Image (tube, rainbow, N blue to C red):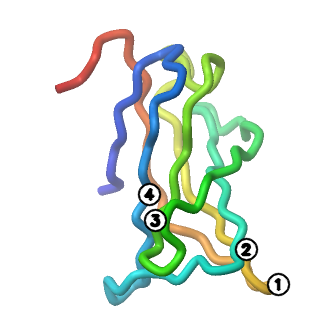
Amino acid sequence: MAKTLNVLTGSVGEQINFPLTRGDGSQKDLTGATVTLQVNTKDGVQQSSRSCTIVDATTGLAQYTTVASDFTEALSPYDARIKIVNGGVTDYSELFQIQATTVKQA
């Protein structure tokens, strides 16, 4: 089953960390890479890609900071994945879900 991240609808400035790993569990090296968050609504409508910040390239840590219009409860759950482009090679994370809610999750 895919991992689910919970975010607050309309949240601004929420930082979502993505520790990116290979299939064997080792960390991906993001040196020189471009990282984006790709999101589809529950109806399969593709949303625009969202740029991520590389927090620590050598440990494979990327981060996305939310803006008000990112996620709504009506379009949840979203199917998402991280796209990594490095030196002309494109790689993707495993699929996961983003659930928007109007109630802060513990």
Instruction: Tell me if label 3 and label 4 are in contact, CB under 8 Å.
Output: yes
Label 4's element?
strand
On the rendered image, what quadrant is the C terminus found in?
Answer: top left
Q: Earlier in the sequence, mark 2 or mark 3?
A: 3
Q: Residue furthest left?
A: 106
Q: Residues within 10 Å of mark 1 (few under 14, many from 20)?
A: few
Q: Nearer the viewer, residue 56 or 62?
A: 56
Location of mark 1 (residue): 88
**Position of residue 39 in the picture relative to residue 72 (left or right):** right
Location of mark 4 (residue): 18
Q: Earlier in the sequence, mark 1 or mark 3?
A: 3
Q: CA distance from mark 1 to mark 3?
A: 20 Å
Q: Where 15 falls versus 55 (above or below)?
A: above
Q: Residues within 10 Å of mark 2 (few under 14, many from 20)?
A: some
Q: Earlier in the sequence, mark 3 or mark 4?
A: 4
On the rendered image, what quadrant is the N terminus found in?
Answer: bottom left
Location of mark 3 (residue): 61
Three-letter amino acid code at the position of disc 2? Val
Q: CA distance from mark 2 to mark 3?
A: 15 Å
Q: Indicate the position of residue 94 as horizontal and vertical percent values.
A: 47, 66
Three-letter amino acid code at the position of disc 1? Gly
Q: Indicate the position of residue 7 as horizontal and vertical percent values.
A: 40, 28
